[in-house]
Image (cartoon, grey):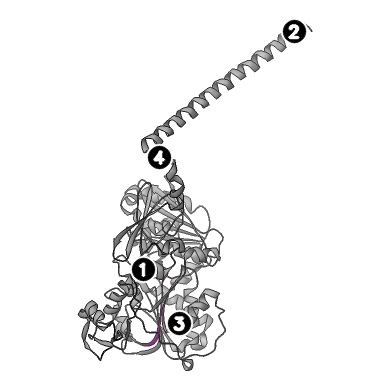
């Protein structure tokens, strides 16, 4: 071997040894880091006094249930656990704090493993019928003691006369106490006619059977699960004059479209009005009244609509909760609740599961910049904006329509636009199978009701991966992030972007 070859081999060996030294140094640094992390975590364990014998029981029951008041509990669970139940009241860095009451069981479902842990008050066999509280002989005294403020006198040994105008208030109080006091009034065969233009899914057929047996029901399914179509089916099957009550003119437009599409032969039997139209219909009699978005019905300005003369009734809501806590009135004013868990409807692929992203930005100028960036991706988009001045600015800046209270043919404008700005008139009920993305720019502060309604528009989507995006300033996120609980309490995850 020549001196040149020897030098070349020596150089190669030296370079290899240098690389080994570098690798050894990297390994030493990594080992030191692992050791430091391990010691830090062991110190944390020592400081936290982790006791291994309690880990297995923790994973078997990783939550705590604490009484809040009569028939209501807090359920506290770590945030890393994929666990949702009831109403998410607040959230810390580490824990979610849910509230569970009897409405959760009626509106959706409580996991069987948890139901026995809630000691709901045993319902009493009282019924309200034709101005009377039916008590039975044995419980008349108990009923009088509990509800004397709603009672005017005894009527024999097994019933009490309800004060005039107090019937719904009494029903609401009894529901608050854990009793469903409705008297089933089965639908009469002579009030029905055949109709096969809409094929009901299994859970819709169950709800129809409940209606036939009871005559008054509240249907509380997730957005996009077919509540309105179920209502159209009922309008076709029940004979006589019928009424549909909705919160907005946009929703009125959509109901009229569906009636024209599916049951045009019965269009003359059906009126569609908003919740503000009580004076127009107060003297009419109906075979069936359908209250859409029935969470509005308990409002002081709308509750009179519950007194309309109607043989049968239905209520529909994907968000049967109220900021004032009057959920009992939602049931009291509609009838027997028929619910189904969102998880089951998603599993059956009846509704879509949106993806959620929240962009936290410095100010409104940054909101406009981010909105422009998002609109570079050309997909069917609804931009929600509560404030008219800002809505008009967005429409002008990006040359897109703005749909608000004075807009005519709202649904046509929304459908024909790849992107458009929509005020609160688009919050509720509207079904747009082609929608791919919702962007919220301005919103009603911390309203969870509004948030659930807005992401609910995406659950009507026929697209594979609908997307819900919320643009919040740092100040808005600090003050109004509780509106996001409407998303997380349903088990959906949010990606936060700064």
Mark 2 or 4 closer to N-term?
2
Residue 493, above or below 296? above
Residue 79, above or below 437? above
Choose mark 2 or mark 4, whichever is in front: 4
Q: Are marks 1 and 2 in contact (CB under 8 Å)?
A: no
- In 3D space, how far apart are the residues under numbered discs 3 and 1 (Cα atoms)? 21 Å
Mark 3 or 2 closer to N-term?
2
- In 3D space, how far apart are the residues under numbered discs 2 and 4 (Cα atoms)? 65 Å
Q: Nearer the viewer, residue 323 or 131?
A: 131
**For mark 1, what is the residue?**
102
Q: Tag count in the figure?
A: 4
Q: Which mark is residue 4?
A: 2
Q: Dot 3, how many residues are within 10 Å of its Cα: few (below 14), some (14-19), or many (20+)?
A: many
Mark 4 or 1 closer to N-term?
4
Choose mark 3 or mark 4, whichever is in front: 4
Q: Dot 2, how many residues are within 10 Å of its Cα: few (below 14), some (14-19), or many (20+)?
A: few
**For mark 4, what is the residue?**
50
Residue 129: x percent and y percent?
32, 87
Residue 429: x percent and y percent?
43, 70
**For mark 3, what is the residue?**
211
Name the residue rendered at 53%, 81% in the picture. Answer: 262
Choose mark 1 or mark 2, whichever is in front: 1
Image: magenta residue range:
310-317
């Amino acid at each position: 071997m020549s001196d040149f070859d020897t030098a070349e081999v020596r150089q190669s060996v030296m370079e290899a040894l240098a690389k080994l030294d570098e690798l050894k140094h990297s390994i030493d640094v990594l080992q030191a880091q692992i050791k430091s992390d391990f010691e830090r975590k062991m110190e944390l364990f020592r400081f936290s006094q982790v006791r291994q014998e309690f880990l297995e029981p923790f994973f078997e029951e990783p939550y705590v249930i604490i009484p809040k008041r009569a028939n209501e509990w807090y359920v506290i669970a770590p945030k890393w656990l994929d666990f949702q139940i009831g109403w998410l009241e607040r959230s810390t860095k580490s824990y979610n704090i849910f509230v569970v009451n009897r409405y959760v069981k009626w509106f959706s479902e409580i996991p069987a493993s948890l139901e026995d842990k809630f000691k709901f008050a045993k319902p009493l066999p009282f019924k309200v019928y034709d101005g009377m509280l039916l008590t039975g002989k044995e419980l008349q005294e108990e009923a009088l003691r509990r509800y004397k403020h709603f009672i005017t006198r005894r009527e024999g040994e097994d019933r009490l006369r309800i004060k005039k105008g107090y019937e719904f208030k009494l029903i609401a109080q009894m529901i608050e106490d854990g009793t469903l006091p409705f008297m089933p009034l089965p639908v009469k065969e002579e009030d029905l006619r055949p109709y096969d233009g809409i094929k009901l899914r299994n859970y819709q057929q169950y709800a129809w059977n409940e209606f036939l047996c009871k005559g008054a029901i509240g249907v509380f399914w997730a957005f996009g699960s077919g509540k309105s179509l179920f209502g159209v089916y009922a309008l076709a099957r029940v004979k006589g004059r019928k009424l549909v009550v909705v919160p907005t003119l946009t929703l009125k437009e959509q109901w009229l479209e569906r009636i024209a599409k599916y049951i045009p032969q019965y269009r003359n039997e059906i009126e569609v009005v908003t919740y503000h139209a009580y004076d127009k219909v107060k003297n009419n009699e109906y075979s069936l009244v359908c209250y859409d978005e029935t969470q509005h019905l308990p409002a002081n300005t709308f509750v009179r609509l519950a007194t309309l003369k109607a043989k049968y009734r239905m209520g529909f809501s994907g968000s049967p909760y109220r900021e004032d806590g009057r959920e009992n009135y939602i049931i009291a004013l509609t009838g027997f609740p028929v619910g189904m868990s969102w998880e089951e409807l998603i599993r059956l692929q009846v509704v879509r599961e949106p993806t959620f992203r929240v962009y936290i930005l410095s100010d409104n100028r940054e909101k406009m910049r981010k909105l422009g960036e998002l609109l570079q991706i050309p997909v069917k988009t609804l931009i929600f904006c509560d404030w008219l001045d800002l809505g008009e600015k967005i429409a002008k800046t990006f040359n897109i329509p703005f749909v608000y209270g004075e807009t005519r043919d709202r649904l046509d404008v929304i459908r024909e636009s790849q992107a458009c700005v929509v005020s609160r008139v688009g919050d509720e009920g509207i079904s747009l199978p082609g929608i791919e993305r919702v962007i919220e720019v301005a919103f009603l502060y911390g309203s969870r009701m509004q948030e659930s309604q807005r992401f609910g528009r995406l659950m009507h989507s026929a697209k594979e991966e609908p997307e819900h995006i919320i643009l919040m300033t740092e100040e808005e996120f600090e003050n109004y992030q509780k509106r996001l609980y409407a998303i997380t309490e349903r088990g959906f995850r949010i990606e936060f972007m700064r």
